[in-house]
Amino acid sequence: MKWHEEDEHEPSHERGLLLALIVLLIVGGFAAWGLGFFGAAGLQSSQDLQAAMSRAAQRLGSEVATSARAVLPIGGHIAKAVKVPGVHPHIVPTKGKAVSPKTQHFTFDGVKYSVTAHVATDVYWGAKKSTRLLVQYPGESDETWTSTYYHDFADDPAQRVTIDDVCSQLRAIKKRSHLGQDQYLELIAKYVQSIPYDWAVYQAGTGNQRFPVETLIDGKGLCGDKSVLLADLLSHEGYAVALLDFNPEKHMAVGVLGPGKVYPDTGYLFLETTSPCYVTDVPTEYTGGMHLTSRPQVIPIGSGTLQYGAADQIAKIVHARDTAQAAAETLYADARSKSLSDAEVTKINAKLSQAYKAEISLRSNVIDRNGDAVGTFMDRTVALAWITRNAWWL
């Protein structure tokens, strides 16, 4: 038999520099048409616009960060030295330094909310000190091993009190805000997506998979940590969910059942967890230049049956975002060929500004190097209302 563990790996610095160059080229291209038009109209100073574009560039980097995750064999001498059969990740309550509750602040539909996680000290330290090893017996497939591994983290009964408490707070928000089934799923997702990304662990390559109670109290996590937490919360609230494990890319996301554009070969709608992002909206590129190309392993979590029913509305949002720049460039080219009054220039500038806002606000927030969300991400209902008022190109 073999022993496996989850480990983290540092991304290539060369790939990071390449991504930075690509981002600068993209931002520079977008800025070119905006600065060119405004400069021709003479409405604002070039320095003011350059400063605005510089600030905006912070929001146009890689959309989300990804953790690296790999199943690594442990040397045979270690396997022989461990004689206790059935070793696996599990929480055995353990004494330790007192653990304080952790409050996460986030916004949803423009309203600020807070959820406070309470974890018993012995449960937290039991999770923190648990082994990350799991035996893979001869003849057991990698798929079976992976499913068992993540269920060990999601299903551990010592976490139930904490998960119950967090979900009771989320349900209270649902009740007083009169949220429907789809908005409630989005609320839970936004709560987890707003937990800062653990850049220090990602860069050091020293991380191991966390139990949900660890992620809640640590107040940060990698993609696997946040995905297991989100799947745990959603399944607790009755949604049909799964983990989507992209092993070659060292990435993990959540899948939710529902009609709409499912991720290929999974039957589930894709839900990113590392930053605020719409259901079904797959980021085009991750930190380090990574793209999702493999077929993920689908790991169902829980026995929920509720589905997400707003994927068609997300498709409208994504279409508005993805067509904004081309429409703005066409408008700009047409305007340059004409002699325009100041009033006409003002109206065109306003339209260009709306298209630019769509490019920024209808996509996932960037997670900066401090683990904070940077940007102006609009939740679904807010985005739909904004599109109705402002998306002149549709």
Image (cartoon, rainbow, N blue to C red):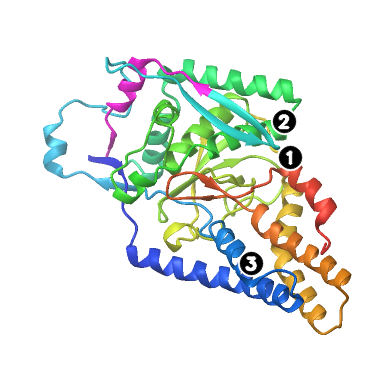
- Separation of marks 1 and 2 at Cα, in angstroms: 8 Å
Which label sits in the foreground, 3 or 2?
3
The spot of residue 205 in percent (x, y) is 30, 48
Q: Secondary structure at mark 3?
A: helix
Left or right: where 260 falls relative to 342:
left
The amino acid type, in three-letter code, at marker 3 is: Leu
- Separation of marks 3 and 1 at Cα, in angstroms: 41 Å
Q: Secondary structure at mark 1?
A: loop
The spot of residue 215 in percent (x, y) is 42, 31
Q: Mark 1 = which residue?
A: 309
Left or right: where 392 falls relative to 186:
right
Q: Residues within 10 Å of mark 3 (few under 14, many from 20)?
A: some
- Separation of marks 3 and 2 at Cα, in angstroms: 42 Å
Q: Mark 2 = which residue?
A: 181
| Residue at the (53%, 34%) spot, across then down | 230
In the rendered structure, which disc, 3 or 2, sits on the residue that comes first in sequence? 3
Task: Using the image, determine if residue 240 lies above or below residue 298.
Answer: above
Q: Mark 3 = which residue?
A: 49
Residue 259 sits inside the magenta stretch? no
User: Do tag 1 and tag 2 residues touch (Cβ < 8 Å)?
Assistant: yes
Rendered image quadrant of residue 119: top left
In the rendered structure, which disc, 3 or 1, sits on the residue that comes first in sequence? 3
Q: Which residues are magenta?
A: 116-138
Q: Residues within 10 Å of mark 2 (few under 14, many from 20)?
A: some
The amino acid type, in three-letter code, at marker 1 is: Gly
